[in-house]
Image (cartoon, grey):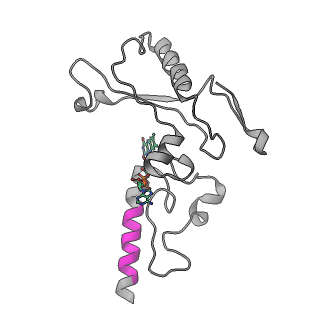
């Protein structure tokens, strides 16, 4: 697995997949229907660069193996030996399966240039009858924000069509 060095393309960060950050959630603890009896459904999420910064994801199996081995040590349980089904998804999959831009599952970032008034509006600047909804417009990314986004754009459309 090759470490990714962002400084090669003028960015001041490095990503070392040998020691990735991740979070884990045992979904079947809150929803028993997502695993058969006597089994658990473990979801692990690792923040990674999108396809602009890391195009080749041939090493995703290796990256996942590192994380699963690390988690196994922390919980003192061999997840690998006890896995029945495993699915690994990386930015190339998000791009191919869902047509997500540059494989970014979270849409636009929330950096200072892309929040609040700087975030792309939910109404097109050129076409008066074109509106946007979802993570990359206002208010932002994540399911609660996307639900709010749908309400905001609905209100905007109703407002525009009522006034016209
Ligand atoms: C692994 C992962 C874990 C996440 N965990 C959380 C979490 O715990 N909590 C949370 O709040 N958020 C989470 N998110 C973020 C959340 O899923 C997104 O913010 C949210 O789904 C974005 O919703 P959306 O409707 O904007 O876009 P999407 O859900 O990406 O939907 C876009 C849809 O448009 C379709 N599409 C694309 N191109 C076209 C086209 N040309 N024509 C027609 N259809 C097209 C796609 O196939 C897709 O179905 C997570 C995301 C990922 C990837």
Q: Work out whether residue 37 or residue 53 is closer to the camera in this orientation and state it.
A: 53
Q: Specify whether residue 159 is painted magenta.
A: yes
Q: Is residue 140 above or below residue 74?
A: below
What residue lies at 49% left-to-right and 14% top-to-bottom? Answer: 74
Q: Is residue 151 above or below residue 58?
A: below
Magenta stretch: dominant secondary structure? helix
In this rendering, would 162 be left or right of 128?
Answer: left
What residue lies at 39% left-to-right and 25% top-to-bottom? Answer: 86
Q: Specify whether residue 72 is painted magenta.
A: no
In the rendered image, the quadrant that contains the C terminus is bottom left
Q: Quadrant of residue 13?
A: top right
Q: Which residues are magenta?
A: 149-160
In this rendering, would 101 be left or right of 77?
Answer: right
What residue lies at 48% left-to-right and 30% top-to-bottom? Answer: 23
**Residue 72's x, y, as percent?**
46, 14
**Residue 50's x, y, as percent?**
59, 44
In this rendering, would 113 be left or right of 134?
Answer: right
Q: Is residue 90 above or below residue 83?
A: below
**Residue 70's x, y, as percent?**
52, 17
Q: Quadrant of residue 145?
A: bottom left
**Residue 68's x, y, as percent?**
48, 20
Q: Work out whether residue 10 or residue 109 is closer to the camera in this orientation and state it.
A: 10
């Amino acid at each position: 697995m090759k470490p990714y060095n962002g400084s090669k393309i003028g960015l001041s960060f490095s990503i070392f997949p040998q020691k990735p950050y991740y979070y884990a959630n045992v979904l079947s603890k809150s929803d028993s229907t997502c695993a058969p009896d006597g089994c658990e459904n473990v979801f692990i999420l690792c923040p990674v660069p999108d396809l602009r910064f890391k195009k080749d994801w041939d090493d995703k199996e290796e990256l996942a193996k590192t994380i699963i081995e690390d988690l196994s040590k922390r919980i003192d349980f061999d997840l690998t030996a006890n896995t029945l089904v495993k699915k690994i998804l990386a930015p190339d999959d998000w791009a191919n399966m869902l047509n997500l831009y540059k494989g970014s599952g979270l849409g636009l970032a929330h950096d200072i240039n892309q929040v609040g008034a700087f975030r792309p509006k939910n109404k097109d600047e050129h076409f008066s009858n074109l509106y946007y909804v979802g993570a990359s417009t206002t208010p932002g990314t994540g399911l609660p924000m996307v639900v709010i986004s749908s309400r905001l754009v609905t209100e905007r459309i109703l407002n525009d069509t009522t006034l016209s």
